[in-house]
Amino acid sequence: MKNLAAKISYVLAGLILTLGSCSESVQEKTQEQVPSSLIERVGNPIITDKFTADPAAMVHNDTVYLYVGHDQAPPGKDFYEMHEWLIYSSTDMVNWEERAALNVVETFEWASGDAWAAHTIEKDGKFYWFVTVSHKEIHGKAIGVAVSDSPIGPWQDAIGAALITNDMTTDTDISWDDIDPAVFIDDDGQPYLFWGNTIAYWAKLKPNMIELDGAIHKIDLPNFTEAIWVHKKKDWYYLSYAYQFPEKTAYAMSKSITGPWEYKGILNEVAGNTNTNHQSIIEYKGKDYFIYHNGSIPTQGGSYRRSVCIDYLYYNPDGTLKRVVMTTEGVEKTL
Ligand code: CA
């Protein structure tokens, strides 16, 4: 049925373009008359041949690159099994092509496994992929950095060691508080690293992106669990994060990347059939997107076999965010 709908939508798209060349008013009327079920979409989840989780999207040269963890737990296993991350790309938000994979232990000699949440960012023509892994020798999770001259790779361990290890933060006894890196480069070029589970941390990064510059700070956020994402829109900074457990997504706003952050409420509810969530927020071709995961692939989908989804994000005039509406239909193909 999807193929049929896609074919019909191509025909309709051609019809709209033809009519559009006649007059704008005819084009608008025709678009209004197109049944929403025939607009080209793949629907959610956007990737169905593999289980994917913890999306981090990056726009570069008019292409969206999507970095995800690969859920590889076999049916019946109720814990994470993740040996690699995957890269997808798209130029229309609907058609996603798998481009490359990055294996934990083949890339980071000091890591023992666990391709948990990651985040990729470009700086000065190089691409830095901050990742969560388990450390071989220092008990607990750790954050490493891979670097490449391209958003696809090949990737190399940028440091040859972890950037953050569990023993660098000792405010909690848990061994998984140093996870979920989120990197943000402010307008003045200063890069910042955010991360954490249970406690939200941040620190400045040096211009080389592979060393901390100064102290590790903490942020007080209500019901903080993990999965920080930081972005800026107009003159507001937004810090979104996984809230409570099972996880909703909540957010805070600030006029400065270093805070103080004002809590603004729930942004997204618990996503179907998974107890975690992990959001990525981007603007692409004039629209705002909320990228997340659920566990909605039939029979095997769930908390350890997740699937990346995309829906629209909308801002209120005062800069606050409208609550995300998770849909089966997903987003439309961009023009
Ligand atoms: Ca720690």
Image (cartoon, grey):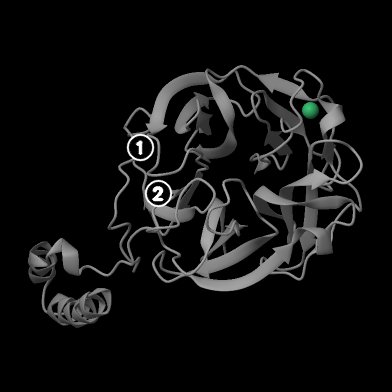
Image location (x, y in percent) of residue 105: 82, 59
Three-letter amino acid code at the position of disc 1? Tyr
Residue occupying the far front of the picture: 76
First along the sequence among labels 2 and 1? 2
Q: Which residue is mark 2?
A: 288
> Are circles 2 and 1 on residues that touch, CB within 8 Å?
yes
Image location (x, y in percent) of residue 263: 48, 19
Q: Is residue 213 above or below residue 108?
A: above
User: Is residue 238 in view from this perspective?
Assistant: no
Q: SS of the residue at dot 1?
A: loop
Image location (x, y in percent) of residue 261: 56, 20
Image location (x, y in percent) of residue 169: 81, 25
* Number of numbered markers: 2
Q: Between residues 160 and 20, which one lies in front from this camera angle?
A: 160
Q: Which mark is residue 290?
A: none
Drawn side of residue 59 relative to residue 24, left or right: right
Drawn side of residue 37 relative to residue 260, left or right: left
Residue 132 image-quadrant placement: top right
Q: SS of the residue at dot 2?
A: strand
Question: Residue at point 74% right, 34% down?
Answer: 178
Q: Which residue is mark 1?
A: 315
Three-letter amino acid code at the position of disc 2? Asp
